[in-house]
Image: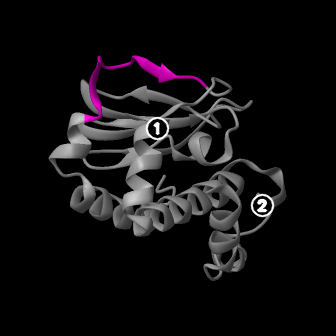
Amino acid sequence: PSGGVVSVNAAKAEIAVRADRAEIDRCALHQLAAGEVLFRQGDAGDALYVVVSGEVAVIADGPPRVELTRLGESSFFGEIALVTSETRPATVEATRATELLVFKRAAVEELCAAEPALLSVILAAVRERLVSRLIATSPLFQPFAGDERQALVGRFRGGLAQVNVVQSIIF
């Protein structure tokens, strides 16, 4: 599964550029063993995570249980719960030994205030991941074959107008 690779790759580059020494000092390092669950779907969310090394699987608990994507080095996740203030929409589990940088909500808010472009990247990733999850898990999209499904996805992923509206409401 590829769940939002384009937005995630853009976001990886943005976070790498923005994460200077001051931001790194405001985060913590968290280690996971292979098979260890970081959080479960439905848990409260108060942090954004960046994969330093290793890999995690993002899983919709279902039923049925569906692996939405895998995220490796420099990928980030956890932004949906931060932006929406809802519970975690998926379970995250290490597929192998993994190290994560953990940015608590306050640190993310400070980063976004200092670098507004970062907020746009995070919001674009939220939209991409929510659409990908809907396509992967909703019975509504199951009858559509490859090209039809991609055309429908394209409609959901249209311009950035929705991101700008959400940005003005949230921050």
- Classify mark 2: helix, strand or loop: helix
- Classify mark 1: helix, strand or loop: helix
Does 61 sit above or below residue 165? Answer: above
Does 78 sit above or below residue 112? Answer: above
Residue in the image at 63% along x and 73% along y: 164
The amino acid beneath tag 2 is Phe
The quadrant in which residue 168 appears is bottom right
Residue named by callout 1: 106
Task: Work out whether mark 2 precedes mark 1 in sequence or the reverse, and give the earlier one.
Answer: 1
Tag nearer the camera, 2 or 1: 1
Q: Which residues are magenta?
A: 26-40
Q: Which residue is nearer to you in this view: 96 or 115?
A: 115
Residue 149, horizontal then vertical, whole percent: 69, 71
Residue in the image at 65% along x and 55% along y: 130
The quadrant in which residue 59 appears is top right
Which quarter of the rendered picture does the C terminus lie within? bottom right
Residue 110, horizontal then vertical, whole percent: 41, 48
The tag on residue 141 is 2
Query: Is 40 placed left or right of 73 in the picture?
Result: right
Is residue 68 rendered magenta in the image? no
Query: Is 66 placed left or right of 64 in the picture?
Result: left
Identify the coloring.
one colour
Residue 13, horizontal then vertical, whole percent: 27, 63
